Image (cartoon, helix red, strand yellow):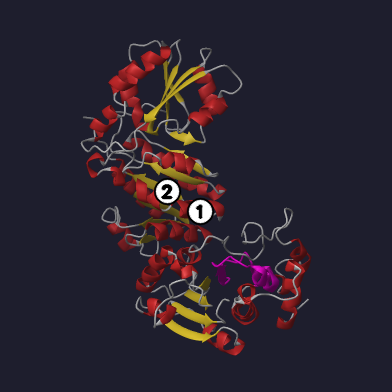
Amino acid sequence: MSRTYAELAGLMTAMTGDEKHGPSATSTLDVLWVLYDQVLRVSPETVDDPGRDRFLLSKGHGPAAYYAVLAAKGFFPEAWLAGFGSADSPLGYHPDRNLIPGVEISSGSLGHGLPLGVGLAHGLLARGLPEPRVFVLVGDAELDEGSNGEAIVYAGAAGLPNLTVIAVDNQSSTWGWGPGGIEAQFAVAGWAVTRVDGRDHGALALALAGSAGEPRLIVAAVERKG
Amino acid sequence: MRVVGDMRTAFGDAAVELLEEDPLTAIVLADISADMFAKAMARHPARVLNVGIREQLMVSVGGGLALAGMRPIVHTYAPFLVGRAFEQVKLDLGHQGAPAVLVSVGASYDAARAGRTHQAPEDVTLIGALPGFSVHVPGHPDEVRSLLRGAVRALGSGRSAYIRLTTEANRSVLGSGSGGLALLREGRLGVVVAVGPMLDPVLEAVGDLDVSVAYATTVRPFDADGLRAAAGDSGVVVLVEPYLAGTSAGVVSEALAGRPHRLLSLGVRELELRRYGTPGDHARMQGLGAAGIRRSVLKFLG
């Protein structure tokens, strides 16, 4: 069964019981949809294929949108959604890669996804797999965590060609990133940076497309967190 | 002064040997020991990575390599590997199910002159709190190679490992090298279990006492069967560990839960000693020199 973007809201309602979803639950929804619908070379049949693209949801908070997209794309049965957060459900408030098909990392504690992605990108190259790309989704406030700083400087200097970071920017970082925005932090470390409208599917697809080449940052700007 | 072994070089040689043999082996460094691996890095730039002074990243990169199907060996100074990056060890290796072999140098007070910042007597307690981690504490450089190779092999079954190297080596290898508890001599009053580099001072301390001496290099999992056999009928056990006192008291108690027993746990007691000096000075001040161990054992045996 192939779902459309318009049907994701219904899948999220199946999880939370709410008809309306706040900005924090949906800040990642469009990016996730575009990734799984148009960009990532991964499917339910290839979740163990060494040559698949990897998507790492580092910002594990509010995973309803992630689960909805994974279910919509057939990675696990939609029937799982109703059990969200219950003792017998594989779907927790933070995802566990050991429980959910297609989930590449267990996240929740902030600042782990990008450093893990750096290792994964290195590992794929070391295994002679230059094609698969590693995408890491972080939040702007998550970048407060110093572990990201370690990874940003290192990955830029190492020039990891297969690593792409998507920073969903809802301006929730308490101290912000100054006039240059998040991208200034990455650009100074040698990353190729772009900023796009995080709700514009065409712009997102364009920014995310392409093959491995250089470490890339795409800032996906969405509404300010209320 | 103790004979200074060279476990770090033994580790470097064994790790490079694995790199050459197995294209899935990788080494991750945070500047420490980078010189030792410079040649290997030139030969295998994709598999010998030095991330600079970034220990959180170093451990996470190990986890990421494991997610790509590699067998990572992650190495730096003990307090920075285990203490500073503990959440990375817990989540990015353990919780992910992305196993790696962690190899530390520095131990409890190899860097006595450097002070508390460079000492990690709490490392085994921390790692021991995590499921799925073996802990190996070699007592001699010649034990390092087989422990490292075994630990890397065990990555295939999803098990991580922590290997704790020290400059304070025993003079000779007395164990089987199998990692389990080796009974070195038998006595009637109880058993003294020496972990890794504690063997030499233990043998000196209890040489004339009617006690058994057992030697362990692997403390997680702890060899419960070996301990029950070594404890014999007396049920009297003295555990001598080169890190925080009582670190393995729980697993020893568990091994002996089915029988009456008495346990004395020796190890590092004072974490904020605020003294410099040599490793030998610290061993004495912590009661872990031969004389201190003897005093404690005699008092305990009564």
Q: What is the x, y in percent for residue A82?
A: 77, 64
- For image coordinates 54% across by 78% down, the residue present is A170
Q: Quadrant of residue B138?
A: top left
Q: Is residue B40 above or below residue A211?
A: above
Indicate the secondary structure of the residue bearing disc 1. Answer: helix
Residue B239, quarter of the rendered image:
top left
Query: Where residue B281 appears, x then y in whole percent?
Result: 23, 31
Q: Which residues are magenta?
A: A43-70
Q: Give the residue type that dot 1 points to.
A: Leu
Residue B156 appears at what percent x and percent y?
Answer: 54, 50
Q: Secondary structure beneath disc 2?
A: strand
What type is the residue that disc 2 sits on? Leu
Q: Residue at x 47, y 27 (%)?
A: B181
Note whether residue A22 is visible: yes
Q: Which residue is mark 1?
A: B93
Q: Which residue is mark 2?
A: B102
Task: Please tell me which of labels 1 and 2 falls first in the chain.
Answer: 1
> Image check: B45 left or right of B157?
left
Asked whether the residues under the numbered discs 1 and 2 touch, taking CB atoms below 8 Å apart as contact, a structural biologist would say: yes
Classify residue B80 as left or right of residue A219: left
Query: What residue do we see at 31% from left, 24% from top?
Result: B201
The image quadrant that residue A60 belongs to is bottom right
**The numbered mark 1 sits on a residue in which chain?**
B
* B143 lies left or right of A52: left
| Residue farthest toward the front in the current orientation of the protein | A226
